[in-house]
Image: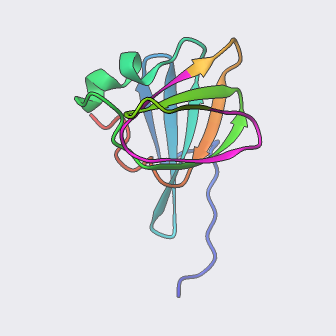
């Protein structure tokens, strides 16, 4: 068992930038937690797809939405929105985009490890 640890998104271990946003990563006790900051106009298929090289996002997200609204479309055509205070599990095979004029802030415990790696 390891001792107590903490980290602060004010000083992330890594930042990955992409069109209309970035991902801050902190590492705690061997795990990675990501904070997505997505600006209005961000869409995975426009801003991250060129980095990922896949038709849809293949990351498995388990995230808490702090602010803004995110719309998700799964490969089977199912769509849903995630808003402030909500938790979502989004399996691989999706596109997503910011809805409206408010930036999205999202804390992700599942999909940050390889997201937008270059």
Span shown in magenta: 81-97
Instruction: Residue 2: give x, y in percent of width and height.
Output: 53, 83
Q: Say which of 36 and 59 sits in front.
A: 59
Q: Say which of 43 and 103 sits in front.
A: 43
Rendering quarter of residue 55: top left
Q: Which residue is drawn at 71% across and 33% down?
A: 83
Judged left or right of residue 86, residue 57 is left
Instruction: Residue 88: give x, y in percent of width and height.
Output: 60, 47
Q: Say which of 75 and 57 sits in front.
A: 75
Instruction: Residue 7: give x, y in percent of width and height.
Output: 61, 57
Judged left or right of residue 79, residue 105 is right
Q: In this view, does 51 lie above or below 109?
A: above
Judged left or right of residue 5, residue 93 is left
Q: Which residue is drawn at 51% across and 70% down?
A: 29
Judged left or right of residue 20, residue 113 is left
Q: Is residue 72 above or below residue 92?
A: above
Q: How many marks?
A: 0
Magenta stretch contains residue 16: no
- Quadrant occupied by the C terminus: top left
Q: In this view, does 12 lie above or below 48?
A: below
Q: Residue at x 53, y 88 (%)?
A: 1
């Amino acid at each position: 068992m390891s001792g107590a640890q903490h980290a602060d998104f004010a000083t992330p271990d890594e930042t990955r930038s992409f069109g209309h946003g970035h991902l801050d990563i902190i590492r705690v006790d061997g795990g990675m937690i990501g904070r997505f900051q997505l600006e209005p106009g961000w869409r995975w298929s426009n801003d991250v797809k060129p980095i990922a090289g896949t038709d849809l996002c293949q990351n498995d997200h388990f995230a808490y939405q702090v602010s803004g609204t995110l719309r998700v479309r799964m490969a089977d055509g199912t769509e849903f929105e995630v808003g402030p205070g909500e938790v979502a599990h989004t399996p691989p095979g999706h596109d997503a985009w910011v809805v409206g004029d408010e930036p999205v802030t999202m804390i992700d415990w599942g999909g940050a490890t390889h997201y937008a790696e270059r």
